[in-house]
Amino acid sequence: MNEDLLARLAAHRTIGTAPRAELEWLVAHGTIERFETGQYLVQKGDPVLGLYIVLAGHVSHLTDQGGTWRKVIEWREGDVTGRLPYSRMTVSPGNSIVEAATDALRIDPRDVAELPMACPHVTATLVHVMVDRARTFKSSDLQFEKMASLGKLAAGLAHELNNPASAAARGAQLLTDMLAESDHASRALGAAGLTAAEMTLVERIRATCLDTRRVQVRTPLERSDREEALVEWLEDHDADPAFAAPLAETDVTTEVLDELAGALDQEKLGAALRSVAAGCAVRGLARDIERAASRVHSLVSAVKGFTYMDQASVPEPVDIGKGLSDTLALMAAKARGKSASVTVDVPRDLPRVRAFGGELNQVWANLMDNALDAVGQGGTVKVSALANGSRVVVKVIDDGPGIPAEMKSRIFDPFFTTKPVGQGTGLGLDIVRRLVDRNEGLIEVESEPGRTEFRVALPVA
């Protein structure tokens, strides 16, 4: 019996408390192996060649997460790794690389199968090691998927925020200049000496700028035709054609302008049109800034609702409809990029479910993101929810090419992906399944060419 090796096992942090007979069994059935710095203990996809009891050194395990190798766990003197009793792992999920020269006692896989009978104390200890290792890998996968989802949402949100923020900044800059023009126009109108009746007519036209209920959304072609007609009218009446642009955004008609031209002489008409146009431009810019700011506010509210950042991390009644709407708001940029149609159909009286709101929103984000990846240009994604007995069922349906039958049973497996290299981590649907399980729900999928449906059933609160 190798007494030196026996003493090293007795001093081992993980298995040192095992009975001497069990340690002697390990010595009798194990082989001392030495690994030099930079050497692989095992590489991704290779079979795991047994149980490794680390006696000295340092080994790191890295997994491929979205094309980047990231350290998940490491083992030093006193740790155990490799093929553990009752573990279903047969091939390595990543690369185990030696960071410092390492000595390990390797137990062959055939002998590992005998451990429960031969070494029950060691086996019980190694089961705890296996559970801790699984928890570490699960936590790493979940954290990575959260970061990947956050990155996608951040990119979409930045795009969504950029447009209204730029519009608000541009509108504020133009508003400064237009306020100065409005002041000049007001003084010119005052100097023109209009009578009370004439001022009443001017104010009636100006009031059309204030009536936001009547503002129409016109197509670019309709707007261009309207502006051309106003330019023609202004030129016919020897007025500045620059007034046409702000007037074209209102409901002012050439008939109303004809009435104004019939009541005022040329000098008064010019001053009145300048004042009305400046007033309309100021109010139009203020309205645009308000819309842009409201859009920014709604996006920030959607992010706040999506993350449940102000809610306690405990299960609580969750409004499925709001969660789906918040998620859609953050996915809008990706949908527009593919000219895809995304609809959300949720009845107003849909009962709430008891769950972790932030986790459910991560589920919706993953399912919508996958659906948008699946559809082609101009594709369709339909999201709906309905009550079904004691559960609420959420459906995400896309008209993409479908999931091949031979792959459907594997789509929820960790690291399995049908996307090209670098575009998919293979963690999204695995995380979805875990989160649905954590919220006491069920997830199912049906797929055929042209229609893929994911169904998530959650218990009513």
Image: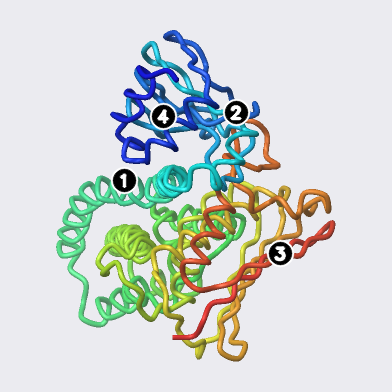
What element does badge 2 sit on?
Answer: loop
Residue mark closest to the camera, 1 vs 4: 4
Residue mark closest to the camera, 1 vs 2: 2
Q: Which x, y percent locates residue 328?
A: 51, 62
Q: Residue at x 25, y 50 (%)?
A: 172
Residue hosting label 2:
108
- Gap in angstroms between the C-alphas marked 4 and 2: 26 Å
Q: Return the mark for residue 445.
A: 3
Three-letter residue code for mark 2: Asp
Three-letter residue code for mark 1: Arg
What element does badge 3 sit on?
Answer: strand
- Gap in angstroms between the C-alphas marked 1 and 4: 46 Å
Residue mark closest to the camera, 4 vs 2: 2
Q: Which x, y percent locates residue 25?
A: 49, 32
Residue hosting label 4:
71
Task: Quarter of the image for the N terminus: give it.
Answer: top left
Q: Which x, y percent locates residue 322?
A: 44, 74
- Gap in angstroms between the C-alphas marked 1 and 3: 47 Å
- Disc on the earlier residue, 1 or 3: 1
Q: Residue at x 42, y 34 (%)?
A: 72
Q: Nearer the viewer, residue 181 or 354?
A: 354
Residue hosting label 1:
170
Q: Residue at x 65, y 48 (%)?
A: 373
